[in-house]
Each structure stands twice: as C-alpha cells, then as structure tokens.
Image: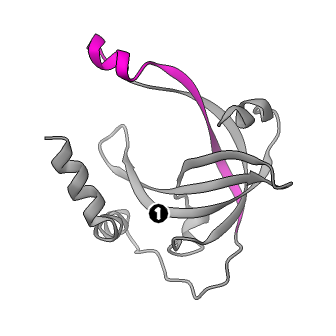
Amino acid sequence: MRDALKQIGNKERGTYVGVVSRLGYKTGYNGHGKPTFLIINLTDINGNLVADHLWINYTKQFQSLGILATGGEVQFNARVSSYLKGYQGNDSTIRKKHPIQYDYKLEYPSKVRLLTKRKPQSVPETNWEFLQYILEENKDFYLKRAKNSQ
C-alpha cells in the first residue's frame, strides 16, 4: 500500500490528510519513550489514498493541537522518507518471519491543522506525564501485548 509514497518520492513536501486512530509510543535509542499516533486512511491533498496507516511522531506542532481524539482528522505537510524495517538480529528463524525490507514514512511535519472541530484537551506538560496518559488510555492494548510476549 505504501507504493504510492514510494512513487511520490522525497524531492518535494506534500500535503496529507488522515484520520487519527489511536495514540501510542515508541522507545527511542536512549530508552526514553516518544509519543506517536496512528493515522489511517492517509490521502494526499487530491484525495488519493497514499497509505492505509502510518505511525507519526507526536511532534511539538501536533502537541500544540492538544490531545488528538480518535476519529479526528488532521492535515499537515511532510516529506516522504524510506527506512529499513524487519528483524535485524542474528536469529535466522525470526529473520525469515520478519525479513529486512524498505518501507516508507512521512517525516518533518509542518503546517499542522486539525480539521475536526472540537474543544481541545491540553497535552500534559512533561514527556513522562504524556506517556503515562497514553499508557492509561491504551491500558488494555498494552496489557494484552505484554501478556502475549511472555
């Protein structure tokens, strides 16, 4: 599905619109969590579907919009970038299940706008408080994931 992003390439920034599905986080290289959100049905400004879903970093510009509610529609400019995904360790069994391949993402979002009208809820002041909020909002998901990984 991300072939459309591949075709767009990284030469120019584009304008994209998508629907917020849920909040999440990723662990940074230093072990600290970074807030993210899942965006679905991502289209370009002309309404062409470019990805069924993407995880986007919850940057300061997105944080300025407040807590992004499920179902809210956002618009932003960004640049397409490629990255390697898949298992990059030495276990060949895992590597067969999750081979290394290129995928495409959007980065450096700017001109962020919330298209859905709502009363904004402020993002917690510290990164730690924001991550705690995300964990609490998605408690069932993270508990289930932790249980399945044991």
Task: State the residue lying farthest toward the left.
Answer: 150
Q: Label 1 is placed on what type of residue?
A: Arg
- Seen in the picture, residue 97 relative to 133 is either above or below; the reply is above
For residue 99: magenta? yes
Question: Residue 27 at x, y = what percent?
Answer: 35, 45
Q: Nearer the viewer, residue 37 or 40?
A: 40
The magenta stretch is 89-113
Above or below, 31 against 61 in this view is above
Q: Residue 125 occupies which quadrant of the picture?
A: bottom left
Q: Residue 124 appears at what percent x and percent y?
A: 40, 75
Asked if residue 11 lies left or right of residue 89, the reply is right
Mark 1, other Cα within 10 Å: few <14 / some 14–19 / many ≥20: some
Say how the picture is coloured. one colour
Circle 1: element type: strand
- Residue 12 vertical position relative to residue 118 in the rendered view, above or below: above
Residue at 71%, 74% in the rendered image: 115
Residue name at image x 67 percent, y 83 percent: 117
- Single out the residue that lies furthest toward the bottom: 119
Residue at 58%, 88% in the rendered image:
119
Horizontal side, residue 32 vs residue 46: left or right = left
Quadrant where the image shows the C terminus: top left
In this rendered view, identify the residue nearer to me: 54 or 77: 54
Task: Please tell me which residue lies in front, 58 or 68.
Answer: 68
Above or below for 38 versus 137 = above
Q: Is residue 82 magenta?
A: no
Q: Which residue is mark 1?
A: 22
User: Which residue sits at x=59%, y=55%?
Assistant: 40
